[in-house]
Amino acid sequence: MKNPKNIAVLIFAGGQSLNTCGAAAVFAAANDVLEQTVYSVHILSPRGGAVGTMSPIQILSDPVSSIAPDTFDTVVLSSGGTDQVREAFELDDVRQWVTQAASQCRRIASTSFPCTLALARLGLLDGRRITTHWAVAPTLAQRCPEASVNPDVLYVEDGAIWTGAGVASAIDMSLAMVSRDLGSYVGNQIAKRFVLTGQRRGDSAQVSAALAVQEKLDPDFSGLITWMRAHLPEPLDVATLASQAAMSVRHFQREFRARTGDSPARFLERLRLEHGYALLSAGLPLKSIATQCGYSNAQQFAKAFARRFGTTPSQVRATSAEA
């Protein structure tokens, strides 16, 4: 390719190496899939040189001053420690470089909480829909009231601004960008090379909602939910669940709602549909997935799936299927 797109992956000290390496590897892998240089990937940092990460890994980088920001198609602020990112953005040249890049490049992204917070402090996220890691989403929402923070998704695209939940989601977000540029076939070939089950949509949940509830329960009810997961294909009515919990039906219904915030039937549906969502990327027939999740037919499963996730099984599968 005569004019490959320049990709900047900007790293700061003290961050997750996977955020940086994962994003860079995805763009570089596109070159291998197409057997031509469609992306030219540059690892940058405020001052260049070897940048230390949370793990015993140092990543070599060039200083941001070495390449003008208006030469980049995409800029990804990958990762860094909270203090280190804040200190970097106190430097005039770094702040000006990122601000100029945001105004001139096609898209700018953040894959970590400290970098997203830095973009917010520059006023770049005002009125935007954004996300970050679920554990720090309340903090981001408090510090960035001008934006709408969704803590439940892997990544969010709002115009030219992309934000991600961090760590492995940096790969998901970069795959989405490559698929947008070059088609889903290329994205899926990269996913296969990385031994991923498929491309995860941006609106995929960071954490299973049912699992999050289970972690807060006492051992008796947590064990019941584990048993429910193992018997999803079976007709699990309230009487069966109450018997498994060694309670009367009425007492069980009261206790279950009090401890989980949901009725047994609705919670069971969440377990079944989350399991179904995970199975869609495995390439199984929809009828088989419906059976494994405890639905009598594919139509019943699809209707419940759309009600829960706001999309259809076929649309989710299309993201993982080869073009």
Image (cartoon, rainbow, N blue to C red):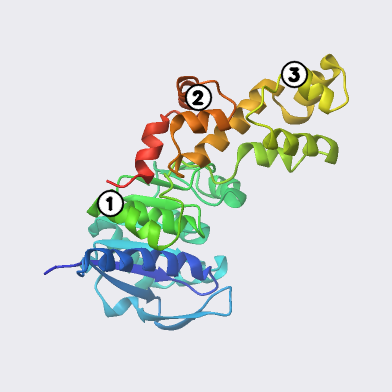
Q: Which label belongs to residue 238?
A: 3
Left or right: 280 in relation to 28: right
| Residue 280: x %, y % from top left | 46, 39
Judge by depth and name the residue closer to the eye, 212 or 303: 303
Task: Give the crowd class for mark 2: few <14, some 14-19, many >=20 residues within 10 Å.
Answer: many
Where residue 140 appears, as percent x and y from the top left, is: 54, 49
- Please rate how many residues cluster around mark 1, counting C-alpha atoms within 10 Å: few if below 14, some from 14 to 19, many from 20: some
C-alpha gap between disc 1 and disc 2: 27 Å
How far apart are labels 3 and 2 at the CA level?
Answer: 20 Å
Q: Earlier in the sequence, mark 1 or mark 2?
A: 1
Give percent across and percent down for residue 10. Answer: 39, 69
Q: What secondary structure is found at the residue carrying circle 1?
A: helix
Instruction: Give whichever of discs 1 and 3 has the lower sequence position.
Output: 1
- Depth check, front residue: 143 or 256: 256
Q: Label 3 amino acid?
A: Val
The residue labelled by disc 1 is: 185
Tell me, for residue 301, which label it has, or none: 2
Judged left or right of residue 97, residue 251 is: right
Q: Amino acid at mark 1?
A: Tyr
Question: Does residue 38 appear anywhere in the picture?
Answer: yes
Label 3 near label 1: C-beta < 8 Å?
no
